[in-house]
């Protein structure tokens, strides 16, 4: 689903991982998260996922034939993470304070869009 950087999608994925770390995003988004005692994701994790995927989606890092929802579902499968009430989350996450904070951290890096 990722557009290749330097001819390789793995290079694109590593670039995204590096930028997440550079932005100071606190979660390891490409590994299964340790859930809290109630079985839910830790506070702020979903907002981080939403911000990262949306930021790079808006930056054209994904092939055009995939929708945001397709990419989000593929990310969940790839990372081993999940979100309860996914459709509700996908319709509302951009209003969350945590999403806005993490999106701003990535935006501050002035990462170029892909052609």
Image: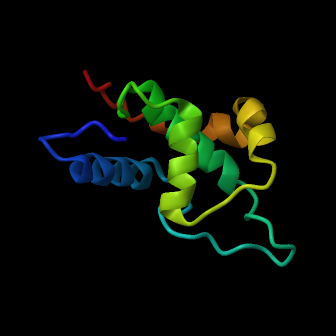
Q: Quadrant of the C terminus?
A: top left
Q: Is residue 29 above or below residue 1?
A: below
Q: Nearer the viewer, residue 106 or 63?
A: 63
Residue 97 can be seen in this image: yes
**Residue most extreme to the right:** 38
From the viewer's perspective, tell me whether residue 112 is left or right of residue 22.
left
**Residue most extreme to the left:** 6
Residue at 73%, 64% (x, y): give it. 41
Query: Which percent across, then down, holds residue 6?
Result: 12, 41
Query: Which percent across, then down, holds residue 95?
Result: 76, 29
Q: Is residue 44 above or below residue 88?
A: below
Residue at 37%, 41% (x, y): give it. 1
From the viewer's perspective, tell me whether residue 87 is left or right of residue 28.
right
**Residue most extreme to the top:** 115
* Colour mode of the rendering: rainbow
Number of numbered discs on residues: 0
Residue at 34%, 31% (x, y): give it. 111
**Residue most extreme to the front:** 65
Query: Which percent across, then down, holds residue 30?
Result: 47, 62
């Amino acid at each position: 689903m990722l557009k290749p950087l330097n001819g390789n999608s793995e290079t694109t994925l590593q670039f995204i991982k590096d930028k997440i770390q550079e932005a100071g995003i606190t979660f390891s988004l490409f590994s299964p998260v340790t859930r809290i005692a109630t079985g839910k994701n830790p506070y702020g994790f979903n907002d981080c996922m939403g911000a990262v995927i949306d930021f790079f989606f808006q930056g054209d890092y994904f092939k055009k034939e995939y929708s945001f929802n397709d990419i989000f579902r593929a990310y969940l499968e790839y990372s081993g993470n999940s979100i309860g009430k996914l459709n509700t989350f996908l319709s509302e996450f951009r209003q969350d304070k945590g999403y806005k904070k993490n999106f701003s951290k990535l935006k501050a890096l002035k990462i170029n869009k892909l052609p």
